Amino acid sequence: MESVSTMDFIATKFADFLTYTGFANVEWPNLAMIVVGAFFIWLAIKKDFEPLLLIPIGLGIILGNIPFKAAGLEIGLYEDNSVLNIFYQGVRQGWYPPLVFLGIGAMTDFSALIANPKLMLVGAAAQFGIFGAYIIALALGFEPNQAAGIAIIGGADGPTAIFLSSKLSPNLMGAIAVCAYSYMALVPVIQPFIMRALTTKKERLIRMKPSRTVSQTEKILFPIVGLLITTFIVPSGLPLLGMLFFGNLLKESTKTTRLAKTAGSALNDIIVMLLGLTVGCSTQASEFLTLDTVKIFALGAFAFIIATASGVLFVKFFNLFLPQNKKINPLIGNAGVSAVPMAARISNQEGLKADRTNFLLMHAMGPNVAGVIGSAVAAGVLLGFLS
């Protein structure tokens, strides 16, 4: 009799176990998102599109869409006290992005911008994509806070997009984050066509004078002065701008090399891994596959295209007022978006296609790092305006 009860118990539990498996709970949207995650990983490995971002995000998408029966197991991203939920708080509460900015500051050399301050205007012009997309998002029926989170995708800055959406539109954060990082990875695909379409052969051949040598004193003063100017204008951007300039001061002071190396390597790598994985996990099919997500990806692409075009066209306009020997090659206008240093590399590649001896990389780094500052300032403006 006891053995019969034992067998019944085992059979009952086994039947219950089967109801918890992924095979019993899978739906086609889960499979569709798993394919998307696998595609991200393929892009990272086969095409070398930002593997440090797309591999964690791709695996996160797969992980977040493993189907299971929600029954208080505390394993899903959206279940309180689960491990993934704890990691996700860094995204939801917005403290991963400032740590990423700390690493960016510790790795970035602002010499190209310091040597040629007018390139800051190119970085500022590229932010037009953000505000243009904001107006269109409002026209499409998004609420002002949601429109701001979507529009920041135009800056091609994943951490900034996550930071702003966590404050203004947390319900759309997963779609916004994945969209922002996707377009960052697709910079080599999207930007060259726009750059070639908006410039002439003669413009692509413009040679820029070598930048002057920047003194160590200037490098040390830049993060301090930059912090004071930008945060006095937009105090709401303090978390991002403060950490960016703090990281850069660690690098340039020459007295805190160990801290700068930690911020720019080990700490940054850990945060990027957790950020990418949890952002990917947040794309559970039930939360992600909506009409709003389609609109967000369309608006994100539009914002990114506007940002690239704005940077290139601004340089062309600016050249009308510059003497012949000081004209700027408009191919560096695309670098006004803050995808560092990928956008600057695209400027250089397109320049070399026009003239194999015309190296634009160091010149393009000026608007590229200005774009990092510009996107953080734009986020601060939107946050201050809508809070």
Image: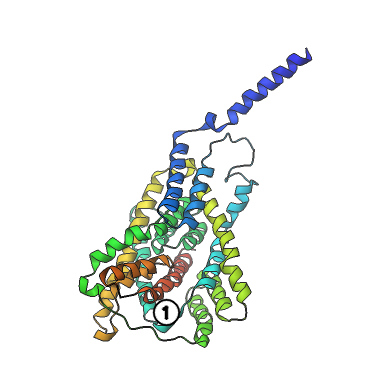
Residue in the picture at 63% in, 26% down: 16
Q: Is residue 71 above or below residue 209?
A: above
**Residue 381 drawn above or below residue 40:** below
Furthest residue in direction top, as rendered? 1
Quadrant in which the N terminus appears: top right
Q: Position of residue 125 (x, y in %)?
A: 34, 72
Compared across the picture, whether 208 is left or right of 185 comes to left
Residue 77 x/y as whole percent: 57, 46
Q: Which quarter of the figure has residue 198? A: bottom left
Q: Which residue is mark 1?
A: 112
Quadrant hosting residue 360: bottom left
* Residue 298 visible within the image: yes
Question: Relative to 237, is 111 above or below?
Answer: below
- Kind of residue at badge 1: Ala
Residue situated in front as seen by the camera: 285 or 202 = 202
Q: Nearer the viewer, residue 95 or 383?
A: 95
Q: Residue 72: horizontal and vertical position, in percent?
A: 64, 38
**Residue 341 or residue 151, whichever sits in front:** 341
Q: Is residue 92 visible from the viewing direction of this image?
A: no
Q: Is residue 322 left or right of residue 212?
A: left
Nearer-the-camera pick, 302 or 238: 302
Identify which residue is drawn at 37% across, 60% down.
187
Left or right, 139 with reference to 386: left
Q: Secondary structure at mark 1?
A: helix
- Please give the count of numbered marks on the rendered protein: 1
- Residue furthest to the front in view is 356
In x, y percent, where is residue 181?
A: 44, 57
